[in-house]
């Protein structure tokens, strides 16, 4: 796969001013679909959660999911939007195999929520206001799986399989106004904005918000213009980016690609782009369609949605604690410094730490694991920590095993290896891999005798009163026992063997 030429990010920022725009698609976690009674469940066998409405069979009529409308209003309120007292659905026409009706039921010029904003906190604690143009209701499409190719994409595939389970799942699409003034912080803002939207919808309880499952997906629009020019440049739209890190990297790459094209005197093609995680680059998709190309017209089978002020206010009263207020409360509860808490937020593990603490770990232990070993492994795997596969329950069980003396910190890392390899719970991995701490005095004494015999000069120093030298013997015992000795008990036995009082 050929990668487009790019200009260095710093040079791009010297020459051009980026303008961003985001369309974030949020799948709602209603029990049934947007316009049918089919189950809205992730992960079932393909084409089992469908009915005649989802498949667009002749003579069927859609029925609006009231719960989805309520969830959409809550999202609009949380984004400081105005809620339309009356709004309608439209048909967005395009042919694609994963849309069995050959149109998508959506909202066009009449969204349920509009004219809002979201104040996004950046890594240094500053805020950037992103203006929200609209948040509208629609249905998701099915899922195509391209078979036989090397990349999993349609290019080079032998054939494609379609799963309609996702067809008709309720979606809210959140569309920003053009975002100006981000400058060199544009990639960081992209990540922070999507993270903020994800936090809001998860906090509201209206979406599972698992990006790896596609519950939250982002279409990232990027254009560049020379400094001082008011007119926007031609934009590209990178479709369906489904991780926070990928959103940041995709925006950065597109800025660098646009800059290279413009710097060489060529023009940008308005098109959709595909993000490739392996190469950290985008490739061309198709020319970007304008609204007229979709032949929108009012959906004749659905009545307008009437959101009375009383209904809207009753939903407003159900809104949970705002995320900003929640963050302040959690920081106070956990006793983290401003820098520690900011690092947690920037790493995207605040929810995981909250769940870990709720499951029984201390805030210090939760932070140690999520910002330490888990973050380290995630960085090596080039994924977000939450995508690594470690759950709060695993962290709590590892901590309990350490506190009970069954394992130590070093062994805990080996246990985590087993958990991530699919070998079971931490306790099961300890059992199957034989990783329990050696605390039997007989076995420890044998290892101590071996270590003392190997380092007689150190033994003499300890007898002479240099107690700190005992660490060298403990290290020798750990080597003999492959790190499985109870270090505290080993120290006690070494001093007893040498006739030294601690």
Image (spheres, helix red, strand yellow):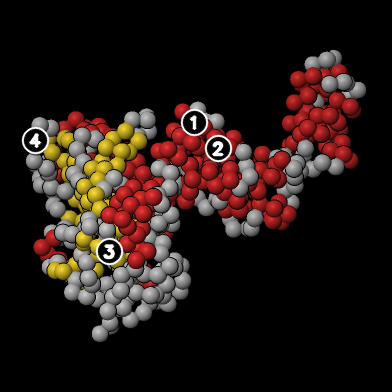
Q: Quadrant of the C terminus?
A: top right
Taking the image as shown, residue 13 lies to the left or right of residue 67, namely: left
Residue at the image point whose x is 85% and y is 42% from the top: 440
Callout 2 crowding tier (Cα within 10 Å): few <14, some 14–19, many ≥20? many
Helix or strand or loop: what does disc 2 sit on?
Answer: helix
- Residues at discs 3 and 4 in contact (Cβ within 8 Å): no
Give the residue pinned by disc 1: 340
Q: Quadrant of the N terminus?
A: bottom left
Give the residue pinned by disc 4: 229
Give the residue pinned by disc 3: 138
> Which label sits in the foreground, 3 or 1?
3
Give the residue pinned by disc 2: 367
Whether residue 210 can be seen here? no
Callout 1 crowding tier (Cα within 10 Å): few <14, some 14–19, many ≥20? some
Q: CA distance from mark 3 to mark 4?
A: 36 Å
* Position of 60 relative to 451 (above/below): below
Point out residue 281 in the picture as x, y percentages from the top left corner.
Answer: 29, 49
Q: Earlier in the sequence, mark 2 or mark 3?
A: 3
Q: Earlier in the sequence, mark 3 or mark 1?
A: 3
Point out residue 79 in the picture as x, y percentages from the top left corner.
Answer: 30, 47
Q: CA distance from mark 2 to mark 4?
A: 46 Å
Point out residue 229 in the picture as x, y percentages from the top left corner.
Answer: 8, 35
Q: Earlier in the sequence, mark 2 or mark 1?
A: 1
User: As drawn, which residue projects farthest toward the bottom?
Assistant: 59
* Position of 425 relative to 183 (above/below): below
């Amino acid at each position: 796969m050929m990668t487009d030429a790019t200009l260095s990010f710093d040079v791009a920022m010297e020459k051009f001013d980026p303008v961003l725009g985001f369309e974030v698609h949020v799948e709602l976690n209603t029990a049934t679909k947007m316009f049918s009674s089919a189950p809205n469940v992730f992960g079932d066998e393909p084409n089992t959660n469908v009915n005649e409405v989802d498949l667009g069979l002749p003579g069927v009529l859609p029925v609006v999911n009231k719960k989805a409308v309520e969830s959409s209003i809550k999202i609009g309120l949380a984004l400081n939007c105005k809620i339309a007292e009356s709004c309608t659905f439209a048909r967005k026409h395009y042919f694609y195999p994963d849309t069995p009706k050959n149109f998508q039921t959506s909202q066009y010029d009449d969204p349920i929520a509009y004219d809002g904003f979201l104040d996004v906190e950046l890594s240094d604690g500053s805020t950037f206001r992103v203006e929200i143009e609209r948040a509208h209701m629609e249905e998701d499409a099915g899922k195509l799986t391209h078979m036989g190719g090397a990349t999993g994409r349609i290019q080079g595939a032998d054939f494609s399989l379609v799963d309609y389970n996702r067809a008709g799942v309720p979606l809210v699409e959140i569309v920003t106004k053009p975002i100006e003034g981000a400058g060199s912080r544009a990639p960081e803002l992209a990540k922070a904005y999507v993270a903020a939207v994800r936090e809001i919808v998860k906090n509201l309880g209206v979406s599972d918000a698992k990006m790896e499952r596609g519950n939250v997906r982002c279409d990232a629009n990027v254009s560049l213009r020379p400094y001082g020019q008011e007119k926007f440049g031609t934009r590209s739209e990178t479709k369906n980016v489904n991780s926070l890190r990928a959103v940041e990297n995709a925006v950065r790459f597109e800025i660098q690609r646009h800059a290279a094209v413009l710097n060489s005197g060529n023009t940008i093609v308005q098109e959709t782009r595909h993000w490739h995680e392996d190469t950290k680059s985008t490739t061309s998709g198709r020319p970007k369609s304008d609204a007229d190309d979709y032949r929108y017209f009012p959906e004749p089978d659905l009545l307008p949605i009437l959101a009375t002020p009383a209904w809207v206010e009753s939903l407003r009263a159900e809104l949970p604690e705002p995320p900003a207020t929640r963050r302040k409360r959690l920081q106070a509860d956990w006793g983290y410094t401003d820098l520690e808490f900011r690092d947690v937020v920037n790493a995207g593990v605040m929810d995981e730490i909250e769940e870990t603490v709720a499951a029984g770990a201390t805030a210090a232990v939760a932070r140690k694991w999520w910002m330490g070993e888990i973050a380290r492994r995630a960085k090596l795997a080039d994924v977000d920590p939450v995508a690594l596969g470690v759950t709060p329950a695993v962290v709590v069980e590892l901590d309990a095993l350490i506190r009970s003396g069954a394992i130590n910190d070093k062994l805990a890392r080996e246990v985590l290896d087993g958990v991530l390899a699919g070998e079971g719970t931490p306790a099961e991995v300890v059992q199957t891999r034989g990783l329990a701490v050696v605390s039997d005095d007989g076995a420890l004494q044998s290892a101590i005798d071996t270590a003392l015999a190997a380092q007689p000069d150190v033994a003499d120093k300890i007898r002479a009163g240099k107690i700190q030298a005992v660490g060298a013997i403990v290290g020798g015992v750990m080597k003999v026992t492959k790190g499985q000795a109870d270090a505290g008990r080993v120290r006690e036995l070494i001093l007893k063997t040498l006739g030294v009082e601690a």
